[in-house]
Each structure stands twice: as C-alpha cells, then as structure tokens.
Amino acid sequence: MRTDAEGSTELGALVALQRGTTYKSSLLGYPGPVLLGLASIQRNGGFRGDSLRTYGGESPSKLILTPGDLYVSLKDVTQSADLLGAVSRVPGGVSAGRLTQDTVKLVFKNRKVTADYLYWALRTPQYRSYCRARAIGTTNLSLSRDDFLTFAVPHPTPDRLTLVGLLEDIEAKIQSNHGTNETLDCIARAIFKSWFVDFDPVRTKAEGRRPAGMDAETAELFPAAFDSGEGGRLPRGWRWEPIGEAIEVVGGSTPSTDNPEFWDQGDTAFATPKDLAGLSVPLLLRTGRKITPAGVEQISSGVLPPGTVLLSSRAPIGYLAIATISVCINQGFIAMLPTDTLPAPYVLLWAEDNMATIVGRANGTTFLEISKANFRPIPILIPNAPVLKRFNGIVQPIYARIAATAIETETLAAIRDALLPKLLSGQLRIRDAEKLVEAHT
C-alpha cells in the first residue's frame, strides 16, 4: 500500500478488513448481539437503529463489534449506490453487534489516524463519489476490496482535527435531539394509552381512589364509572362514532406530471407517501415537491391546513404524520381534518393504536389499499369534551417541542453536510466553522 509523503495515505495502509458471514434467519430475535447488516447503515453513511434485530446463533469473536468500531458496506442492493461503501459507527447504546455477509469491519493496523477521523473522512462527498465511480454490477452493486483500500485519506492536520471535533459535537447534538424527541413521543403515547385505551383514571376513580400522578382538577374531568354497550365497557358518557362521521376524511390526486403549468415555480407543498417514509418523528415539516395554484385546482381536496393527519393508504399502508404546513396530497393518502372536538394529536395516536384494524380493511390484488369507503366506518372513541381539551393542552405542546427540535436537527445536519467537503479539501476557516456550530448547539 502506498503512502503519499505530501499528504495522504491509502486506506489499506491504515486498516484491514474483516468480512462478516451469513446467519440463520430462524435465530433472529433470540438473545445475542444485534445484526449489523445493510439495514443498520444510513444512506451515505451513519448508524441506523430503527430496525435492529438480535441474533441468537453462532457469533465468533472476530465478527463482534463494540461501541466506536467502524464497519462498511461493500454492497448495495439498489442502483442508487447510496449504501455502496457507506460507513457506520457502533453507538454507545449497542453493547455488541455482529457482522453479516454484507458488511466488513475496519481493523486498524496502526493509529496514524483515529477512528473518529477516518469515520468522518468516509462520510465526505468526495469519498462517496469515489465509491460510486467504482461500482461493479448491474442489478446489485458492489465495491471491490482493492478499490476500497486504495482510497487516499488525507493526513490529519491540526485544522482537520479541529473540524472533526466540530463534526463530533454536531453529531452528539443530533443524537441528543433524537433522544429527546423519542422520549417526548413516548410520553404522548403513554398518556393516550393510559387515558383512552386502558382507561386508568376511570378505573381508579371507580375503585374510589384518586388517579396517581394526576392533579385533582384533571382527575375531576374523568367519569367514575363504566357503562356497557355494543362495543364493550366504556367510561360513562363516552361513545364510539365512525371516524368518517366524527371528522372530515378526504383523499388526493396527482395532476399531470407532464404539464409544467402545475409544477414549475410552485409554492404549495405537495406530499406523497415517500415524504413520510423514514420520518424520525410523526410530523411532516416539508415535502419533496411543490405545486402551483393551477395544479391545486386539479385536486378535489385542495390545500389542506396545518394540523391535518395524513395516513398512507397503500404501498405501504401505515405511514402517519401530522402536517405542520399547508399541503396538497396525492392519491396515496387518506387525510383526516381534526376539529376542536377531536384534536390532531388524538386522531394521530388513535390511528396508530388502531393500525391493525385499518390494515385489516384493506384489499387489492397488485398491492393492498384501504379505500376511504372502507376507512370511514372504523369507530373512533369520543371521550367527553373536557377530557379531550385537557389531553390536547398537555400533548399539543409536546408535539410543538418535537417539531422545534426536529427543525433544529435538520439545521445541524445541513451544517454538517456543508462542513464535510472541507475535511478533505482543507478549504476551511476554522473560526467561521466554530461560530456556525456554536450558534446552533
């Protein structure tokens, strides 16, 4: 392997590769390390933890990774090459991970560069372009070991090391924000489940006790008894009502994509289910396309207001989000327009809790789809108005904070992406970069 005395070293002089092996799918979910395959790597690099599964089968020590270890995908099952050569780093929350046949561990031969420095060097757009240019294959892409190991890593100058420190700070803040939003989302879900699924406050009052952790004013809003009805026991005065009668339920459509009059210079957000795929929080902050006023006129549901709850109704069914912006939707959605009686957080969490029922009403041959006609009769629980008002007063600020934190995270990610090219090019004024980061951390 070659070392350039003027400023770079080939990867092969720094690391060796430990390839993973296949595993038995029948042993997934059993106690053991988590699998670190393609699904654990973000597009273009970074750790993805939303679909991790443990593995109870054989896991030799050479295949085990611990926090801080780096691993790479030398494959991509799509033509996008977004995962080809993409690097990931085992986070502190994963005590042990196991390589699969699709990933390789980077085993350091020496410490001319730190793992943190190499991690960010392999996150740069220059490295990603290098991988894409050397992709092999037609259906599934691959990157040869030799091509990977000949990538030239610039020597870590003081300015580059300072930049790596800034990138680490940004990453830590992004991860902290994700943790904050996960906690807030769990709080909202827990309140919904306790109040409207398990009926904890009503059960407690029916037993002559005061609901734990609840102030007297809030507790007073709940009934203290149950009534029996067609749908089973319900808190007294509460009822079931078809969702299509309780609130307005609409669908969307797509104007001709060949007509620039509908799309060029548009300023209204236009959503497709793809905009909801991979959301870290159940909030739609922006969309990938915009539509013109002429295009809006082609959609019967028109522009939907902020607070509309969106449910993807096909391919797949089940993406959910509250729109924080005015938005038009395509035919892949069912949209629910909440009211003061049934606020958006309640409708969102109801749909999430009843997803099995929603999917069960779908049909289709090419792909499953739930129509508005099949969706509208699904019953939604209507609690008394004071309870719903109090619920919204508690949960709405939670979602407002989730939205603010998500926007901050997007800003930080944009700053990170703007700084990354500078790591290899060296074209950076560190003081300016530090000020930029300090303003958002």
Image (cartoon, rainbow, N blue to C red):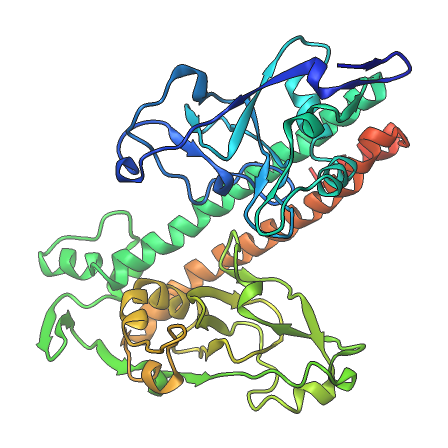
Query: Picture coordinates of residue 244 (x, y %)?
Result: 36, 85
Is 180 left, or right, of 138 in this rendering?
left
Is 174 left, or right, of 36 in this rendering?
right
User: Does any portion of residue 246 appear in the rendered image?
Assistant: yes
Residue lying farthest front? 137
Which residue does the image show at 26% across and 33% down from the upper left?
30
Query: Looking at the rendering, which quadrant does residue 371 occupy?
Result: bottom left
Which residue does the image show at 54% across and 83% down from the upper left?
252
Query: Picture coordinates of residue 80 (x, y %)?
Result: 64, 52
The N terminus, quarter of image: top right
Is 283 situated above or below 437? below
Is 17 situated above or below 281? above
Which residue does the image show at 15% across and 65% down from the upper left?
224
Query: Picture coordinates of residue 161 (x, y %)?
Result: 77, 20
Residues 265 and 409: in front is 265
The C terminus, quarter of image: top right
Residues 207 and 370: in front is 370
Is 28 situated above or below 351? above
